[in-house]
Image (cartoon, coloured by chain):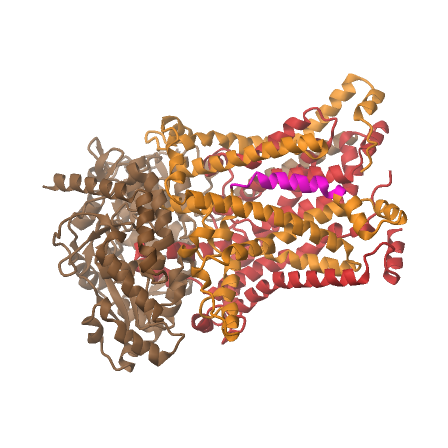
Amino acid sequence: MAQSSMTVKKKKRRINAVSIPTEIVINIIMILFCLLCVVPFIFVIIISFTSEESIAQIGYSFIPQGWSLDAYKYAFEMGYSLWRSYFNSFFITVVGTVLSVLVCILYSYALFRRDFKYRRFFTFFSFFTMLFGGGLVPTYIVCKQLLGLSDNYAAVIVPLMVNPFNIIVMRTFFQSSVPEELIEAAAIDGSGEYNTLFKIIIPISKPGIATIGLLNALAYWNEWYTPMLYIRDKIHIPLQYLLMQLQRNMEYLAKNSAAMGADAIKAASEMPTQSLRMVLVVLVVVPIACAYPFFQRYIVAGLTIGSVKG
Amino acid sequence: MSKTITKPAKAMKKSGTMTAKRKKTLMLLTMVAPGAIWLILLRYLPMVGIVMAFQDYKIYTKDPTFLNNLTHSAFVGLKNFKFLFATSDTWVMIRNTLGYNALFIVLGLVISVTFAIMLNEITHKFVAKTYQTLMFFPYFLSWVVASYFVQAFLDPTRGLLVNLMESWGMTPIDFYNDCGPWPFILTLCNIWKNTGYSAILYLAAITGIDASQYEAASIDGASKWQQIKYVTLPHLKTMIIILFIMNIGKIFCADFGLFFNVPLQSGPLYPVTQVVDTYVYRAMMTTQNYGMSTAAGLLQNLIGFICIMVANTIVRKIEPDSALF
Amino acid sequence: MRKKKLLSLALAAMMVTGLLTGCSSTTDTTSSSSSSDDTSTESTTVEETSTEDASGTTASGLDISEHVTLKWYLHGSNVTDDSAVMEKVNEYLGEKLNVTLEPIWGTWGDFDEGSTLAINGGDNIDIYFTCSWSADEYNQYAKRGAWVRLDNPENNLIEQYGSDVWAALPDVLKEGALTDGVDGYGVYAVPGFKDFGTQNTWDVNVTLLEELGYTLEDVENRSYYEFGELLQAAKDAKGDDFYPLNVEAMVLERMVTNSVIVNGDSGTCNVLSYYIDPEDVSKDIGSTIVNKFGTEEYKKFVEQTREYYLAGYIDPALANAQTANDTLMQKQKSAQYLIGTQSYALGYEVQTSAERGIEVAYVPCTPPYVDKTSTQGAMMAISTASQNPERAMAFLNLLNTDSYLMTLLEYGVEGIHYNLNDDGLVVFTEERDNYTPWRNGMGNITLLPAQEGEGKDFFTDVFIPYYSSAKGIPAFGYVFDPTNVETELAALANVAGQYALALDAGAMDPETALPEFLQKLDDAGMQSVVDEANRQLEEYLATQE
């Protein structure tokens, strides 16, 4: 049914679509904003192809004086460690996203249920942790010494698994898209709680779930701080941390150069170049940008997704 | 949303006995369990460490485990909080933190809701998808990388904007030494980075709206504007309020990278870029005192907590369905 | 039925998580010795071994009958594969001390967070790198109880197991290691024998200088205040985009005003100054510590720098903390400068001339001198969390006196990471890229064979004489203890961050900014910090007489 209505819309404008001038204005605003968003990335790509001499001469520029592939060559010569960290990032993101979405759905669905006896308690229980935490040292102790999260994939996945913000957002999605009559009806039909959730609620909550999934995937993909704390070997390093390592090495030497003196200058002169850092940014961004449309399929389905008919 | 929600209690009575009710609670508890266990282990357990805020934290040399260190460290009262108020610039950093956050919350909300609605109105879904993908790009770039980009425009010698001003015969602004334009630049950067992210939350909520509601409204002769006003916005209300409350909780915490990296840590800009987080960071670089950083964090959270409780209470009075808890 | 299915689903999910941890820890144990599998070693570092050790004690009377794993946290390394090295190291150490070494290769970027978390959280790491500039600052953490006092009268580890390394170290380093820690005034770490002298120099692009019709003498005979003519000549010749004065502003300030860092002062932004005589660094010119920014010298310096800045001699990028160092290095590498600043290390002329493709000369501002900060540049401390401080000391003793072990750990395995050329000098292979510890961050570098380009007897003929000639500054042993004024220092660091760099680089107008700056320093409690520092200095001087 959805398909047939789609084909109709392609020929004719939707009945209640905005007027054509309005839509043009909307498009212009969108295009301008999108340019603002994309140009910096193009800028990054340009820097990644800029020769070192040009950066030394005129700094970062949209029109460099010279081009070079050296940084890419250098990056690909990193070989194993680069590909390994690529794999790690993928693995961590996929497994982490699946697990965290699952936990988030379960938790927020219970919070969504008005007839859940401890609803308010558990809402507060998760929300409270959004504000208060024990700080770095105690969290580190619990993760490392108590849970053994050190030098393994779990060390990157577990610390990010639950996010109170996502739980509350997911609960709000349920509130705004799932009619409670549906749950009642299912209960009357004798459907168990898990059955109702997985067979009835989840299929109609796809936009919300896809959104939470996307946010989780992004969080996992972008994470570098957790691996910095818990990963000391070279086998489990994700890509984003590999990038941050270079960045932080530079910053550290800059910060301490006055105290370190000759040592810092010598060490800094062995650091990778500016353009290499941009190459790594490109390598980090491209895969996740490619994965984005996958989630988007569910999010921007727009009005074409029929909601539940009571 | 229709107001005809039947109270679940009715269904309960129908389905029967106390055991069924208890069974349901039990099942729902098993759903909460994985998350709750995680929260206990990774969030509540470490809260023991909050006492560090009131301690002169020392390592217990005989058996230096964390708990031993905690129990053997001396309490110093509120000493660790003092550094936040030890300078004549305390007011500046509080003003900046609260001011920017208030601005970001309001502007962010208006812009992302507008963008979400606009995206939803675009006829060609492919175009809308493309816009949305592109809008998300800034989210992938760290503030450090963003700062290079900003610098390409503002650099005093080679910046594009500076060159442009020169070619127009204007005296170029020395951006990294002139506080004037920075509130504007920082706000722009914030919108640039976060709009794509929050618009998607609202867009997903809009997507959940039953199409028949629009059709019904349209048949009743409602204009597009009226449809937005009477169908879309009421539907988004819960999401708007929830996100608003949650942002209020972070009112005393600033986006560190935005205020630290984007102005290139330039000293002369401190009057408009110094926020609580940057102040604490710079203080920590000097003292390496965990008690002090814990104290600062605790204060930030406490203020956020109070703000949230106030906001939530107000919301619960007016709009009980949208309250956070 | 359905519920059962779901339950098994949940179980499966849990098993997946379980598998993740399980599976990765097995890869750990099978991979290399570098991957520290904490879960298994956390509870017991001392492992029972079979009674194959017949001897059981070393020459120094250390009981080595039990096998021990030592964890060692290093700084600044770039190591991706240490398996070949560690295999040999552990074979050797197993024989000598019945020890397995597990290095943790901290990098520049993660050491500060990693080490301080490990120390404060009580991780069972035996030996930490420490120094006067990293986050696990030697003096501060000695006071907080992180390090074992090595010359503790009740259990003198140095005397018992570290006499060899102690005999091998120059006196100035031993004195530099003295600090007021949790167990009294003494030694809390073994200092590394590295380039411990400080000498600030003008980094001169001789090629350009001669192009402009000047000679090196023109720089040598001028003070900073007379550089204007040279800089203008370069600016005229090279155009608007050329900034002849390529400086690290904070270092420049110390060079021009002849001040030294006060050990224990607020890390990145120093607020205290101690002045020395540029001709004779050890001469006592009245030991007091002052507010660096309140002096006449400072005022004169920032006014001159402002003039140079406005004349376009200094790149504005050098005035932002974030871009300063990148810019500085790029300009050095591409030789886009006339005069710069450099903290000198031996052999730099040759190295940098080759790198930059110009003739570089370094014109010293003072003879090399030794202060507390430079002697604490790289040290190894034994953690109070260590279960085996005796064995750790014995290891440090061996490392700093045994050329084979030091070379192995530092340069890697001969034939894999480096080769010796016909003159017996070290030439690195490509494999070295996967194993590059920080040379100065390990220990006694004079044990190492010289590298190609350094010359055969580099350490004995050049290195040791140069650094032995370095004299200590007056009040050399003084360490400022910031404990009582931490609150003030935290606020001062922020005030100094706002003004110091911008003033030192000339980006701020001292006419208006300097009085404002001084006022804010005052508000933040500058005077009480200076008073506290001087009180401690007087106390120290009293004990010296």
Q: Is residue C244 above or below residue C498?
A: below
Q: Is residue A37 left or right of residue C265?
A: right
Q: Residue, x 84% and y 22% (percent of image)? A: B15
Q: Is residue B135 above or below residue C456?
A: above
Q: Is residue C476 left or right of residue B153?
A: left
The tint of chain B in the picture is: orange
Q: Residue, x 39% and y 65% (percent of image)? A: C316
Magenta stretch: dominant secondary structure: helix
Does C375 appear in magenta?
no
The answer to which quarter of the image holds residue B40 is top right
Residue C334 image offset from top left, x and y in percent: 38, 72
The answer to which quarter of the image holds residue A260 is bottom left
Q: Which residues are magenta?
A: B234-252
Between C468 and B121, which is closer to the camera in this rendering? B121
Output the letter for the chain in brown: C
Query: Residue most toward the left?
Result: C545
Residue C199 image offset from top left, x and y in percent: 23, 60
Between A39 and C107, which is closer to the camera in this rendering? A39
Q: Is residue A304 left or right of residue C247?
A: right
Q: Is residue C197 visible?
A: no
Residue A124 image offset from top left, x and y in percent: 62, 30
- State the quadrant of the C terminus of chain B: top right
The tint of chain A in the picture is: red
Does B246 appear in magenta?
yes
